[in-house]
Amino acid sequence: MYGPSSSLVNLVLFALAEEANPSFHWLDIRRSDERPPEYDPARLGWIDERRSWTVNPFDAFAMENARANAALFELVRKDEPSATLVRLSEFLRLPDTMQRILSEAPAAGKPGVLAVANVQRAAPAFPSATLPPILDAMAWAGYSLFVGYAGPPSSARQNFDHVLRVDGEAPACWRESSITLEGPSPMGDLTPQQPRALAELPSTARVLNRAFATR
Protein backbone atom coordinates (compact mmCIF):
# COMPACT_ATOMS: atom_id res chain seq x y z
CA MET A 1 0.00 0.00 0.00
CA TYR A 2 1.40 3.38 -0.94
CA GLY A 3 0.42 7.03 -1.10
CA PRO A 4 1.72 10.56 -0.53
CA SER A 5 0.79 10.78 3.17
CA SER A 6 2.59 8.36 5.50
CA SER A 7 0.13 9.07 8.33
CA LEU A 8 -2.92 8.35 6.17
CA VAL A 9 -1.32 5.26 4.63
CA ASN A 10 -0.51 3.92 8.09
CA LEU A 11 -4.07 4.42 9.33
CA VAL A 12 -5.46 2.56 6.33
CA LEU A 13 -2.79 -0.11 6.81
CA PHE A 14 -3.94 -0.52 10.40
CA ALA A 15 -7.59 -0.83 9.28
CA LEU A 16 -6.91 -3.56 6.73
CA ALA A 17 -4.57 -5.50 9.02
CA GLU A 18 -7.08 -5.39 11.87
CA GLU A 19 -9.82 -6.59 9.53
CA ALA A 20 -7.67 -9.55 8.47
CA ASN A 21 -6.69 -10.48 12.03
CA PRO A 22 -7.35 -8.37 15.15
CA SER A 23 -4.25 -9.95 16.73
CA PHE A 24 -1.91 -8.73 14.00
CA HIS A 25 1.64 -7.53 14.71
CA TRP A 26 2.65 -3.93 14.00
CA LEU A 27 6.26 -3.22 13.01
CA ASP A 28 7.24 0.44 12.70
CA ILE A 29 10.43 1.32 10.86
CA ARG A 30 11.86 4.36 12.62
CA ARG A 31 14.79 5.44 14.74
CA SER A 32 14.55 4.69 18.43
CA ASP A 33 14.79 8.40 19.26
CA GLU A 34 12.01 9.37 16.87
CA ARG A 35 8.51 9.90 18.24
CA PRO A 36 5.58 8.60 16.14
CA PRO A 37 3.42 11.26 14.45
CA GLU A 38 0.15 12.49 15.94
CA TYR A 39 -2.13 10.02 14.20
CA ASP A 40 0.10 6.97 14.48
CA PRO A 41 -1.87 3.86 15.60
CA ALA A 42 0.73 2.95 18.24
CA ARG A 43 0.81 6.50 19.62
CA LEU A 44 -2.99 6.45 19.78
CA GLY A 45 -2.72 3.38 22.01
CA TRP A 46 -4.50 1.02 19.63
CA ILE A 47 -1.91 -1.73 19.55
CA ASP A 48 -1.12 -4.13 22.36
CA GLU A 49 2.47 -3.56 23.51
CA ARG A 50 3.14 -7.28 23.05
CA ARG A 51 2.47 -6.93 19.32
CA SER A 52 4.03 -3.52 18.72
CA TRP A 53 7.62 -3.44 17.45
CA THR A 54 10.11 -0.81 16.34
CA VAL A 55 13.22 -1.38 14.25
CA ASN A 56 15.97 0.82 12.88
CA PRO A 57 15.60 1.49 9.13
CA PHE A 58 18.83 -0.33 8.33
CA ASP A 59 17.90 -3.42 10.36
CA ALA A 60 14.34 -3.90 9.17
CA PHE A 61 14.75 -6.43 6.36
CA ALA A 62 18.48 -7.07 6.16
CA MET A 63 18.89 -10.80 5.67
CA GLU A 64 21.49 -12.29 7.99
CA ASN A 65 23.90 -15.16 7.48
CA ALA A 66 22.26 -18.31 8.82
CA ARG A 67 25.65 -19.76 9.82
CA ALA A 68 25.20 -18.51 13.38
CA ASN A 69 22.09 -20.66 13.62
CA ALA A 70 23.69 -23.69 12.00
CA ALA A 71 23.35 -25.78 15.16
CA LEU A 72 19.59 -25.78 14.69
CA PHE A 73 20.01 -27.83 11.53
CA GLU A 74 21.05 -30.73 13.76
CA LEU A 75 17.36 -30.94 14.72
CA VAL A 76 16.29 -31.51 11.11
CA ARG A 77 15.87 -35.05 9.88
CA LYS A 78 18.36 -36.13 7.26
CA ASP A 79 15.58 -37.18 4.89
CA GLU A 80 13.83 -33.82 5.12
CA PRO A 81 12.84 -32.52 1.65
CA SER A 82 15.28 -29.99 0.23
CA ALA A 83 12.46 -27.44 -0.13
CA THR A 84 11.91 -27.54 3.63
CA LEU A 85 15.60 -26.97 4.27
CA VAL A 86 15.60 -23.98 1.93
CA ARG A 87 12.61 -22.46 3.73
CA LEU A 88 14.19 -23.07 7.12
CA SER A 89 17.43 -21.49 5.95
CA GLU A 90 15.60 -18.41 4.70
CA PHE A 91 13.65 -18.15 7.94
CA LEU A 92 16.86 -18.26 9.99
CA ARG A 93 18.28 -15.46 7.87
CA LEU A 94 15.46 -13.10 8.79
CA PRO A 95 16.28 -10.32 11.28
CA ASP A 96 15.86 -11.37 14.90
CA THR A 97 12.77 -9.21 15.42
CA MET A 98 10.97 -10.79 12.49
CA GLN A 99 11.88 -14.28 13.67
CA ARG A 100 10.42 -13.49 17.08
CA ILE A 101 7.20 -12.23 15.54
CA LEU A 102 6.77 -15.17 13.18
CA SER A 103 7.52 -17.73 15.90
CA GLU A 104 4.09 -16.94 17.38
CA ALA A 105 1.63 -19.37 15.83
CA PRO A 106 -1.37 -17.67 14.20
CA ALA A 107 -4.69 -18.09 15.98
CA ALA A 108 -6.78 -21.00 14.74
CA GLY A 109 -8.82 -20.04 11.69
CA LYS A 110 -7.03 -16.73 11.23
CA PRO A 111 -4.06 -15.89 9.00
CA GLY A 112 -1.03 -14.49 10.74
CA VAL A 113 -0.55 -10.86 9.77
CA LEU A 114 2.48 -8.60 10.08
CA ALA A 115 1.84 -4.96 9.17
CA VAL A 116 4.99 -2.95 8.50
CA ALA A 117 4.70 0.84 8.57
CA ASN A 118 7.04 3.34 6.90
CA VAL A 119 8.73 0.83 4.62
CA GLN A 120 10.06 3.69 2.48
CA ARG A 121 12.64 4.33 5.19
CA ALA A 122 14.19 0.90 4.71
CA ALA A 123 14.02 0.83 0.91
CA PRO A 124 17.53 2.30 0.36
CA ALA A 125 19.05 -0.38 2.58
CA PHE A 126 18.13 -3.40 0.50
CA PRO A 127 17.42 -4.21 -3.17
CA SER A 128 13.94 -5.39 -4.14
CA ALA A 129 15.45 -8.74 -5.18
CA THR A 130 15.80 -9.62 -1.49
CA LEU A 131 12.03 -9.42 -0.96
CA PRO A 132 10.94 -12.80 -2.43
CA PRO A 133 12.92 -14.86 0.14
CA ILE A 134 11.37 -12.79 2.94
CA LEU A 135 7.86 -13.34 1.59
CA ASP A 136 8.53 -17.06 1.15
CA ALA A 137 9.80 -17.38 4.72
CA MET A 138 6.74 -15.54 6.03
CA ALA A 139 4.34 -17.70 4.03
CA TRP A 140 6.07 -20.80 5.35
CA ALA A 141 5.53 -19.49 8.89
CA GLY A 142 1.83 -18.94 8.14
CA TYR A 143 1.96 -15.14 7.89
CA SER A 144 0.99 -12.51 5.35
CA LEU A 145 2.93 -9.27 5.00
CA PHE A 146 1.07 -5.95 4.77
CA VAL A 147 3.27 -2.92 4.11
CA GLY A 148 2.75 0.84 4.09
CA TYR A 149 4.95 2.92 1.81
CA ALA A 150 4.89 6.73 1.62
CA GLY A 151 5.83 8.23 -1.71
CA PRO A 152 5.68 7.15 -5.36
CA PRO A 153 5.32 3.41 -6.03
CA SER A 154 8.37 1.20 -5.68
CA SER A 155 9.35 -1.50 -8.17
CA ALA A 156 9.21 -3.95 -5.24
CA ARG A 157 5.41 -3.84 -5.40
CA GLN A 158 5.47 -6.43 -8.20
CA ASN A 159 6.29 -9.07 -5.57
CA PHE A 160 2.95 -8.63 -3.79
CA ASP A 161 -0.40 -10.22 -4.57
CA HIS A 162 -2.26 -6.92 -4.13
CA VAL A 163 -1.13 -3.31 -4.48
CA LEU A 164 -3.27 -0.47 -3.11
CA ARG A 165 -2.88 3.25 -3.79
CA VAL A 166 -4.18 5.66 -1.16
CA ASP A 167 -4.88 9.06 -2.68
CA GLY A 168 -5.03 11.62 0.11
CA GLU A 169 -2.75 14.39 1.31
CA ALA A 170 -3.32 14.04 5.08
CA PRO A 171 -5.44 12.18 7.65
CA ALA A 172 -7.63 15.25 8.10
CA CYS A 173 -8.62 14.96 4.44
CA TRP A 174 -9.68 11.34 4.67
CA ARG A 175 -13.32 11.95 3.74
CA GLU A 176 -12.15 13.31 0.38
CA SER A 177 -9.55 10.57 -0.06
CA SER A 178 -9.80 7.33 -1.99
CA ILE A 179 -8.17 3.94 -2.35
CA THR A 180 -7.54 2.10 -5.61
CA LEU A 181 -6.64 -1.54 -6.15
CA GLU A 182 -4.04 -1.87 -8.87
CA GLY A 183 -5.06 -5.13 -10.63
CA PRO A 184 -5.35 -7.70 -11.71
CA SER A 185 -7.64 -9.60 -9.30
CA PRO A 186 -10.35 -8.27 -6.94
CA MET A 187 -9.70 -7.92 -3.21
CA GLY A 188 -12.71 -7.95 -0.91
CA ASP A 189 -14.97 -5.05 -1.86
CA LEU A 190 -12.34 -3.55 -4.16
CA THR A 191 -12.37 -3.94 -7.94
CA PRO A 192 -9.14 -3.33 -9.87
CA GLN A 193 -8.66 0.20 -11.21
CA GLN A 194 -11.88 1.50 -9.65
CA PRO A 195 -11.24 4.12 -6.92
CA ARG A 196 -13.33 3.85 -3.77
CA ALA A 197 -13.78 6.58 -1.19
CA LEU A 198 -12.26 5.64 2.17
CA ALA A 199 -15.56 6.70 3.74
CA GLU A 200 -17.35 3.98 1.73
CA LEU A 201 -15.32 1.12 3.21
CA PRO A 202 -16.54 0.11 6.69
CA SER A 203 -13.12 -0.90 8.03
CA THR A 204 -11.31 2.30 7.00
CA ALA A 205 -14.22 4.60 7.88
CA ARG A 206 -14.43 3.11 11.37
CA VAL A 207 -10.70 3.49 12.03
CA LEU A 208 -10.46 7.03 10.66
CA ASN A 209 -13.54 8.16 12.55
CA ARG A 210 -12.00 6.70 15.69
CA ALA A 211 -8.71 8.52 15.09
CA PHE A 212 -10.39 11.91 15.00
CA ALA A 213 -12.88 11.12 17.75
CA THR A 214 -9.98 10.62 20.18
CA ARG A 215 -8.30 13.97 19.40
Image (spheres, grey):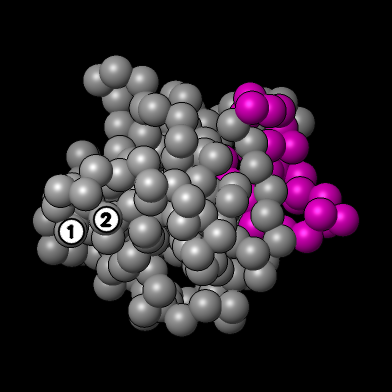
Q: Where is residue 109, by image quadrant? A: top left
Disc 2: which residue: 85
The reply to whether the magenta stretch includes residue 48 is yes
User: Picture coordinates of residue 117 (x, y %)?
Assistant: 57, 53
Q: Is residue 207 magenta?
A: no
Q: For numbered disc 1, what is the local secondary structure?
A: helix
Who is closer to the viewer here, 187 or 93? 93
The image shows residue 45, relative to residue 2, as above or below, that is: above
Q: Secondary structure at mark 2?
A: helix
Q: Which residue is under mark 1?
A: 82
Packing grade of label 2 (10 A; few <14, some 14-19, many >=20) is some
Residue 161, horizontal then vertical, whole percent: 23, 58
Residue at position x 34%, y 65% from top?
133
User: Would you identify the image quadrant in which residue 169 lies?
Assistant: bottom right
Q: At label 2, which amino acid type do we have?
A: Leu
Residue at the image point whose x is 37% and y is 27% from the top? 106
Residue 177's spot in the image, x, y percent?
A: 46, 53
Picture residue at 59% right of the left edge, 31% below the top: 51
State the extent of the magenta-drawn residues as a range. Answer: 26-50
Closest to the observer: 163 or 101?
Answer: 101
The image quadrant of residue 178 is bottom left
